[in-house]
Image (cartoon, helix red, strand yellow):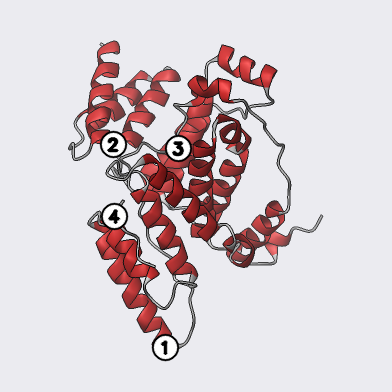
Amino acid sequence: MTIQTGNTMNIHKIVSPRLFNVLLIRVLGKMSLNNISGTSALYNMMKGFQLLRAGFVLSWPSIIKHSTNPDKITNVSTILDTADGIFEMGRYEECYNILINSKNEKDIEVKWRLCRALYNMAKDSKYDEQYRKDIIFQAFEIIAPELEQNWDHFAVHKWYALTLDAKSSNIGIREKIKQLENVKKHMDLAVTLNPNDASLLHMLGEWSFQVTELPWHQRKTIETLIARIPYSTYEDALEYFLRAEAAQPRFYSMNLLRIGYCYLKLNKCDQAKYYLKLAASYPAKSNNDHQANKEAVELLRTLK
């Protein structure tokens, strides 16, 4: 249907690293996480917690795992190439329509791309608030059932984490807090399967950063009224941001800003200056770039 406008044995020694990772995450997937309940009264405390700023477009290389039938491969590959090209041009609704109107909507490579298109459409203010909420829920319903059948596919975990985070934010702060660790778990699983995904590594860094930045009094209030909030450190966040930078240098202005900020918090001023200067001079092509430029300049002034 066309949308109208509006992720006791040393077994690792006897199996390949890839297989070991797959086996490991299948075990982790069966482990339960501590539930975190919340209250909508804490909205103002947590409304700033977001894995990615609104202007960050999520795009990355795919791992194609569809049918071995030659005709189908050619057909699906053509559709994916076309959809990817249109997505890169920022035409997310058109990308969605191409995918949903194909005869391969059950292919996992098509499904996660449907989620990608819907997720980015939901960030576009040209659609009304209710519509954006609806398509986030739609994206979640597309990817959630795939966890069982495609547990070893990094994009399934990645998009599950992203759509779960967005969905829980739309439901309310109670659900947002409840799902924090679950979102982190699936991001970890995705990066285990695809360790060189820069955008995913940045998201993991942002998760650690946001948790670390939560003021002590707010954390205590949440933990008193609700339950445990995950802990992290600037060192944790910095490690992810640096890994993202190593995987794809200069790919995102905010990643450079975060690296500089974390170094500043760790009292490593020389390293902080280096990355803040990179962020301050980053070519501004989006609102995020302009914001990174501005914040980096302000932080550099504190180092003089």
Return the disc, 2 or 4, that comes first in the chain's sequence.
Answer: 4
Label at residue 5: 4
Q: Position of residue 67 (x, y in %)?
A: 49, 81
Say whether residue 161 is left or right of residue 246.
Answer: right
Number of other residues with Cα within 10 Å of mark 1, as a class: few under 14, some 14 to 19, many 20 or more: few
Q: CA distance from mark 3 to mark 4?
A: 27 Å
The residue at which mark 1 appears reads as 70
The residue at which mark 3 appears reads as 51
State the SS at label 1.
Answer: helix
Q: CA distance from mark 2 to mark 1?
A: 41 Å
Which quadrant: the N terminus? bottom left
In the image, 73 versus 136, the foreground residue is: 136
State the SS at label 2.
Answer: helix
Q: Position of residue 174 (x, y in %)?
A: 60, 31
Nearest to viewer (mark 3 / mark 4)? 4
Q: Is residue 166 above or below residue 265?
A: below
Return the disc, 3 or 1, that comes first in the chain's sequence.
Answer: 3
Q: Position of residue 126 (x, y in %)?
A: 27, 44
Amino acid type, mark 2: Ser
State the SS at label 4.
Answer: loop
